[in-house]
Image: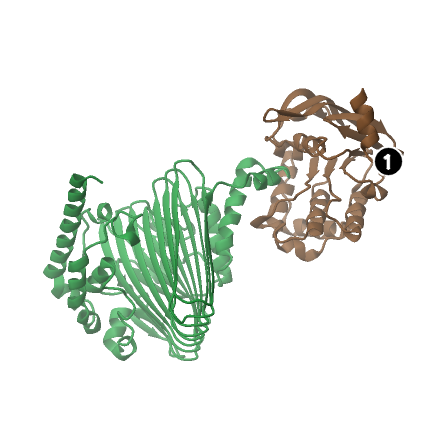
């Protein structure tokens, strides 16, 4: 970049930062009114962190493959109170998961959207699910130890921006020794006639010896450009089991930035699956901190991108104590001029002996115009450690293609089968069986070029 | 059934097949033997439609149709089957989906409706028993983590599913212990019918104890240099390939 261009870029970043701070200051009363004291308590400090950092620029190493300025440098409408809407999810929303009885929670443009009049549901076994703002107001003692405890406000301006501006989101609480039998399904909907910037804030607390499967679906329901900047903090207590599946299926005008920060205590089993099936611009940050001995993390990811889509995953698996294990597998299929990135860091802290950490990232480029940047990064400060990493970027296996064709399967179908098989290696790790089958179907539709959104979702049909 | 006339093929600038002539009729079993590098596997690959090789001259017909004009998948649907020397592992693609797609493509080619899920599973079960393949193998991804023997059995299982008119078994015996060899050979023999034919490509005579050929051809330097009955295989076993090489090189 020459110096003039650099100045222009810096100017843009400063303009964006100042603009966002102005919005914050001008709307602070409204922001606070439609949130909770606990959240409001953190805003002042957070906006200072944002003022110091701004939005990350391409010179900042963690964001070198994703240019944020063009995403933020659009005019977005921001509103700071839940919109009055006729969306009656109970009646019309049946997100297509045959055979999956799930406990459903909805957000609309960053605010919890009650489907039965209640903003916070408490199940007989003590499990809570609902609006984070509501929960923070009525049960502050449950949130206070955890809210904003994992979010890196000091090192990522986007997280600080979220802490300063986010008003609502989802709170999930699974008390000690409780198993949530049904999967919890969170559906984040974006629907507006004008472009929107949405800051969503979630907190998931799974206490000791508890279990939960959580599916998060992100959808755009109207064609306006959206920018969502979501922070999710997940606390997994000792021997807790949590599976978090994050499915992104948004249109080409959408920008989706997610920050997921997970802390796993002794013996906890954490499994994440980040499925970027469709989206104009996607950036996922995932940080799993293994803080208690015997904790285990699985981090899986799949990206399917075509046209000019851009999907960037940045992960950090942190082995802070001895005897933890982690297994990470990210795969990408990129078509047309799509661009993708994967930066996978594994950090093994001093004393974290007997660590086992494995990472691989495999990518298929279907055209010569698609690009993928894969960057594994290992920092190991202990000596009794087994770590491996591998990254590949390549084309479909010609031998395998011929093998399928030699059995009578046409070239086009054979290619689809190979791509599907490639993706299935990620999908197969989803623990919720009906969901796994459904995702397989969605991947198939996507690879066939037939997926602009989840087909059998009536809400989306209603909007179409 | 299969008629090969003066077939020449090369890879890069290297001509490997230098004028193959071969006639195969329904009900026959042909063995093609020859020293390493003689072109046996190339012949199999060229017949199956591998684009890596360029056919520079000659003609091949399968039941009167010009084979060389067809892409690999159409050759398969027309009844040609290649059992690979090195079957490919395809992670993430299940045997069931693979075979379902293949069987239904064959049916479509013959103007038939796709098989129902239950009919398909019934067919799988029958054919698994026929070729003595472990039922669990078909629950896995194609060849993934299969042993050498399992891979070869899986080839014969696919052959049983697709019921080809002409099967080419490329070094099916390589890497097999005697038990696996017997199972594979039994499978091939059970699939034998008066209206189909088999070409067995092998380096050793051993397999031919189990799959008894009607004709044995010796391929050397890209040509068939000798053809005779099954006794030729025994002669080769006894004397090795050197006498053939000498004879041919002198000519």
Left or right of A189 on screen, residue B74 = right
Which chain is home to disc 1?
Answer: B
Element type at mark 1: helix
Q: Residue furthest right?
A: B231
Q: Is residue B110 visible?
A: no
Residue at image point 33% right, 73% down: A121
Locate residue B40, reporting x and y percent. 72, 33
Locate residue A84, reporting x and y percent. 22, 60
> Is B113 rendered above or below residue A95?
above
Left or right of A266 on screen, residue A79 = left
Q: Colour of chain A?
A: green
Q: Is residue B50 visible?
A: yes
Closest to the observer, A6 or A440: A6
Which chain can be seen in brown? Answer: B
Q: Name the image quarter holding residue B19.
A: top right
Q: Residues within 10 Å of mark 1 (few under 14, many from 20)?
A: few
Q: Name the image quarter holding residue B42.
A: top right
Coloring scheme used: by chain
Locate residue A180, reporting x and y percent. 44, 73
Residue at image point 23% right, 75% down: A137
Left or right of A209 on screen, residue B148 = right
> Is A2 rendered above or below residue B120?
above
Residue at image point 60% right, 41% down: A404
Closest to the observer, B16 or A442: B16
């Amino acid at each position: 970049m020459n110096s003039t261009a650099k100045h222009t870029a810096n100017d843009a970043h400063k303009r964006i930062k100042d603009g966002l701070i102005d919005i914050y200051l001008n709307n602070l009363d409204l922001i606070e009114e439609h949130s909770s004291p606990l959240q409001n308590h953190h805003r002042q400090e957070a906006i200072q962190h944002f003022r110091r950092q701004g939005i990350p620029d391409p010179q900042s190493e963690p964001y070198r493959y994703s240019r944020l300025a063009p995403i933020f440098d659009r005019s977005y409408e921001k509103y700071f109170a839940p919109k009055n809407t006729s969306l009656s999810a109970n009646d019309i929303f049946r997100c297509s998961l045959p055979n999956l009885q799930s406990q459903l929670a909805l957000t609309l443009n960053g605010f919890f959207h009650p489907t039965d009049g209640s903003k916070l549901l408490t199940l007989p076994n003590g499990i809570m699910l609902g609006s984070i703002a509501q929960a923070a107001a009525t049960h502050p003692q449950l949130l206070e130890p955890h809210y904003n405890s994992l979010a890196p406000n000091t090192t990522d301006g986007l997280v600080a921006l979220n802490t300063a501006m986010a008003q609502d989101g989802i709170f999930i609480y699974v008390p000690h020794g409780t198993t949530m039998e049904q999967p919890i399904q969170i559906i984040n909907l974006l629907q507006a006639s004008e472009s929107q910037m949405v800051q969503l804030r979630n907190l998931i607390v799974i206490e000791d010896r508890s279990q939960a499967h959580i599916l998060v679906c992100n959808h755009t329901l109207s064609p306006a450009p959206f920018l969502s900047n979501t922070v999710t903090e997940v606390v997994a207590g000792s021997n807790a089991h949590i599976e978090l599946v994050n499915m992104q299926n948004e249109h080409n005008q959408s920008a989706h930035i997610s920050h997921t920060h997970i802390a796993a205590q002794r013996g906890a089993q954490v499994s994440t699956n980040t499925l970027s099936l469709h989206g104009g611009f996607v950036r996922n940050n995932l940080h799993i901190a293994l803080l208690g001995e015997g904790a285990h993390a699985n981090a899986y990811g799949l990206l399917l991108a075509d046209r000019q889509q851009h999907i960037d995953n940045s992960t950090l698996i942190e082995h802070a104590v001895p005897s933890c294990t982690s297994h990470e597998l990210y795969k990408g299929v990129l078509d047309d001029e799509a661009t993708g990135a994967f930066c996978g860091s594994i950090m093994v802290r001093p004393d974290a002996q007997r660590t086992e950490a494995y990472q691989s990232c495999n990518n298929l480029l279907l055209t010569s115009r698609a690009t993928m940047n894969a960057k594994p990064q290992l920092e190991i400060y202990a000596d009794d450690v087994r770590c491996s990493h591998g990254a590949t970027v390549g084309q479909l296996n010609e031998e395998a293609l011929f093998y399928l064709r030699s059995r009578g399967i046409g070239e086009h179908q054979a290619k689809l089968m190979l791509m599907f098989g490639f993706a299935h290696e990620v999908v197969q790790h989803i623990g919720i069986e009906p969901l796994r089958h459904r995702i397989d179907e969605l991947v198939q539709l996507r690879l066939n070029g037939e997926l602009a959104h989840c087909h059998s979702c009536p809400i989306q049909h209603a909007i179409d | 059934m299969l008629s090969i006339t003066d077939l020449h093929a090369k890879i890069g600038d290297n001509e490997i097949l230098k004028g193959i002539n071969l006639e195969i009729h329904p009900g026959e079993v042909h063995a093609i033997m020859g020293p390493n590098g003689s072109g046996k596997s190339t012949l199999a690959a060229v017949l199956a439609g591998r684009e890596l090789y360029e056919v520079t001259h000659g003609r091949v017909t399968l039941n009167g149709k010009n084979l060389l004009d067809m892409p690999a998948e159409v050759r398969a649907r027309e009844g040609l089957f290649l059992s690979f020397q090195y079957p490919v592992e395809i992670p993430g693609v299940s045997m069931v989906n693979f075979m379902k797609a293949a069987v239904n493509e064959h049916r479509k080619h013959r103007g038939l409706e796709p098989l129902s899920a239950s009919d398909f599973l019934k067919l799988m079960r029958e054919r698994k028993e026929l070729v003595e393949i472990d039922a669990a193998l078909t629950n896995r991804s194609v060849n993934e983590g299969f042993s050498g023997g399992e891979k070869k059995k899986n080839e014969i299982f696919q052959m049983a599913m697709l019921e080809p008119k002409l099967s080419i078994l490329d070094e099916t015996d390589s890497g097999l212990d005697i038990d696996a060899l017997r199972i594979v050979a039994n499978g091939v023999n059970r699939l034998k019918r008066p209206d189909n034919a088999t070409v067995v490509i092998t380096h050793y005579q051993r397999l031919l104890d189990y799959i008894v050929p009607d004709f044995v051809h010796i391929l050397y330097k890209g040509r068939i240099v000798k053809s005779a009955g099954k006794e030729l295989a025994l002669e080769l076993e006894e004397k090795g390939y050197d006498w053939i090489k000498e004879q041919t090189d002198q000519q």
